[in-house]
Image: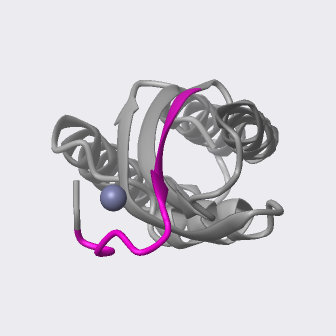
């Protein structure tokens, strides 16, 4: 829920509580309602703050690299995917990665595989820019 809608809901709640003025329990209800709204607003603000901080720190959603690795590994000819880098920028995600493939495939086939990988990733993560770097099997996994 958006922070603004929480505040609006809280204000609606307060005005409903206010419209019951004259009843004995109203003053109590007002303060309880105000307290509830305050707690909700603080909670939502803290969440927004945390999200802003992780955006500023370019923190990728948890498990996304593993997901990308699994998507790439399903593509025929791919031995493994590694050196996966994910950088969210607002709603957009920049992804670059290495894939190891059989060294005897043609450049044409290797390129086709990168397009299959890119499209498979885009189906799951969008909008995104995906760059796939191909290297022949036998290259150390940690190479860049
Ligand atoms: Zn590599």
Residue drawn at the location 68% of the way across and 42% of the way down: 110
Q: In which quarter of the image is ligand 1?
A: bottom left
Q: Does the magenta stretch include residue 32?
A: no
Q: Nearer the viewer, residue 54 or 5?
A: 54
Determine whether 83 is above or below 122 in the image: below
Q: How many numbered marks does the figure carry? A: 0
Colouring method of the image: one colour
Residue drawn at the location 61% of the way across and 31% of the way down: 5
Residue drawn at the location 41% of the way across and 50% of the way down: 44
The single residue placed furthest to the front in the displayed view is 104
Left or right of 63, for residue 116: right
Determine whether 105 is above or below 133 in the image: below
Residue drawn at the location 58% of the way across and 67% of the way down: 69
Pinpoint residue 118: horizontal percent, then vertical percent. Answer: 69, 37
- Say whether residue 99 is visible: yes
Pinpoint residue 40: horizontal percent, then vertical percent. Answer: 45, 56
Pinpoint residue 94: horizontal percent, then vertical percent. Answer: 43, 31
Query: Magenta residues, as a range?
Result: 129-142
Left or right of 81, for residue 124: right
Pinpoint residue 50: horizontal percent, then vertical percent. Answer: 26, 53
Q: Nearer the viewer, residue 20 or 24?
A: 20
Question: Which quadrant holds the N terminus?
Answer: top right
- Say whether residue 37 is visible: no
Q: Nearer the viewer, residue 82 or 23?
A: 82
């Amino acid at each position: 829920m958006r922070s603004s809608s929480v505040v609006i809901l809280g204000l609606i709640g307060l005005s409903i509580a206010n419209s019951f003025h004259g009843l004995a329990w109203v003053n109590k209800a007002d303060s309880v309602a105000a307290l509830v709204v305050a707690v909700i607003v603080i909670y939502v603000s803290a969440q927004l703050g945390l999200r802003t901080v992780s955006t500023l720190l370019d923190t990728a959603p948890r498990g996304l690299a593993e997901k990308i690795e699994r998507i790439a590994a399903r593509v025929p000819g791919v031995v493994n995917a590694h050196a996966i880098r994910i950088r969210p920028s607002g709603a957009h995600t920049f992804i670059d990665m290495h894939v190891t493939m059989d060294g005897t495939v043609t450049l044409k086939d290797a390129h086709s595989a990168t397009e299959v990988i890119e499209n498979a990733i885009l189906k799951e993560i969008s909008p995104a820019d995906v760059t796939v770097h191909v290297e022949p099997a036998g290259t150390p996994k940690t190479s860049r």
